Image (cartoon, grey):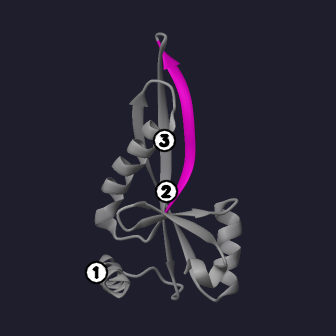
Amino acid sequence: MTQLLGLKSEPYSGNWSLVKVLDGFALDRKIRALGWNFFFMATEEKAIFFGAPGAKKIQNALKRILGKVKQQHFNSLEVTGIVARRFLGVPYAIVSAHSRHVQQSCYLDSAEARRTSQRDAESARG
């Protein structure tokens, strides 16, 4: 899909890749221009960690979020926020994300259909 859209991506975690794009709206426009649909799931997933936000801590938080959404078999995840805060002087951060799903049909596939599609894509990759 990233090749069709002319997007740059890099391996991230397991079968997940990091797509470098300005925002979800720009990506949505590109996907719809190809005649596909880009679903946004309303449920927000969050991970919290203590300490100042750093690349490694954010990556670990994202891996925890990916673990939560893996059972839903959506093929995309949009990070919607990384917020640093303090509580009683202790720094912490909250990473927020929403599941997304790219598919041709304008009706969201069932979990079983998404699982089958995901399995087929993984076996095609080798």
- How many residues crowd around disc 3 within 10 Å: few (fewer than 14), some, or many (20 or more)? many
Residue 55 in percent (x, y) is at: 50, 39
The amino acid marked with disc number 2 is His
The answer to whether mark 2 and mark 3 are in CB contact below 8 A is: no
For the N terminus, which image quadrant?
Answer: bottom right
Q: Which residue is mark 2?
A: 98
For the C terminus, which image quadrant?
Answer: bottom left
Question: Which portion, as a residue range, is magenta?
Answer: 77-87
- State how far apart marks 1 and 2 are (Cα): 20 Å
- Residue 55 vs 105, above or below: the answer is above
Q: Is residue 23 magenta?
A: no
The amino acid marked with disc number 1 is Glu
Q: Which residue is mark 1?
A: 112
SS at mark 2? strand
Residue sitting at x 49%, y 83% = 107
Residue sitting at x 43%, y 37% = 57
- State how far apart marks 2 and 3 are (Cα): 11 Å
Residue 95 in percent (x, y) is at: 48, 41
- Which mark is drawn over residue 95? 3
SS at mark 1? helix
Comparing 70 with 9, the one in front is 9
In this rendering, position of residue 120 left or right of residue 46: left
